[in-house]
Image (spheres, grey):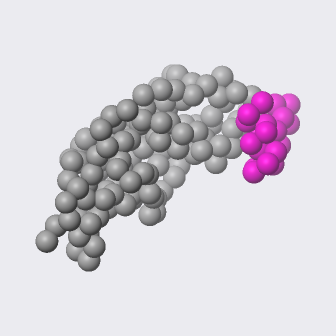
């Protein structure tokens, strides 16, 4: 595993990539949907065909969960863990059975806290891509990151 990074170690423009990938399984799409997002286009391929998806598609929340797995399994080695404060999430393309997902991320902004010298915030753009290099999710997130040495 890579060395853990603190706010002081990060630079705007710094990039990260997941060390592994995840293959999307049709049975997992359906089981996730049955429990958390039971809509026909996530549960049944035939029911999904006449929808705007044109076939079975993973729930966006399932894609988000898979993204988190890729991020925490070595994609972004932030000390203290991945702690989101807010964000904007988009799904430009559906995630399909058989897709092989990977994650790339870029630091967009770094803001040390004025009131809490032991931490700061970063803004990252985390993109989940399939095997065709198509973005299936884009998450622009503000994350809380500890400082190596509190300022002061």
Give the camera-side residue of 5 and 136.
Answer: 5
| Residue 146 in picture, x, y percent from top left | 31, 59
Screen quadrant of the C terminus? bottom left
Screen quadrant of the N terminus? top left
Above-or-below relation of 115 to 34 = below
Quarter of the image holding residue 22? top right
The residue sitting at 23% across, 70% down in the picture is 117
| Residue 7 in picture, x, y percent from top left | 25, 54
Give the camera-side residue of 92 and 78.
Answer: 78
The residue sitting at 23% across, 48% down in the picture is 10
Instruction: Please identify the residue farthest to the left as the structure is shown.
Output: 152
Region in magenta? 27-47
Residue 115 on the magenta span: no
The residue sitting at 51% across, 52% down in the picture is 89
- On screen, residue 72 versus residue 17, left or right, reads right
Above-or-below relation of 47 to 12 = above
- On screen, residue 87 versus residue 54, left or right, reads left
Residue 94 in view (yes/no) = yes
| Residue 26 in picture, x, y percent from top left | 74, 28
Give the camera-side residue of 23 and 56.
Answer: 23
| Residue 130 in picture, x, y percent from top left | 53, 28
- On screen, residue 112 versus residue 41, left or right, reads left
Residue 92 in view (yes/no) = no
Quarter of the image holding residue 16? top left
The residue sitting at 47% across, 41% down in the picture is 72
* Main SS of residues in magenta: helix
Residue 37 on the magenta span: yes
């Amino acid at each position: 595993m890579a060395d853990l990074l603190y706010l002081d170690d990060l630079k705007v423009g710094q990039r990260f990539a997941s060390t592994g990938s995840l293959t999307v399984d049709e049975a997992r799409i359906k089981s996730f949907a049955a429990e958390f997002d039971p809509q026909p286009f996530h549960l049944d391929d035939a029911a999904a065909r006449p929808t705007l998806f044109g076939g079975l598609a993973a729930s966006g929340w399932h894609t988000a969960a898979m993204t988190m797995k890729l991020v925490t399994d070595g994609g972004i080695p932030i000390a203290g863990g991945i702690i989101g404060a807010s964000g904007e999430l988009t799904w430009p393309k559906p995630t399909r059975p058989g897709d092989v997902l990977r994650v790339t991320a870029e630091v967009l902004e770094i803001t040390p806290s004025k009131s809490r010298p032991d931490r700061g915030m970063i803004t990252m753009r985390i993109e989940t891509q399939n095997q065709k290099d198509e973005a299936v999710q884009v998450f622009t997130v503000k994350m809380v990151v500890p400082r190596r040495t509190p300022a002061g």
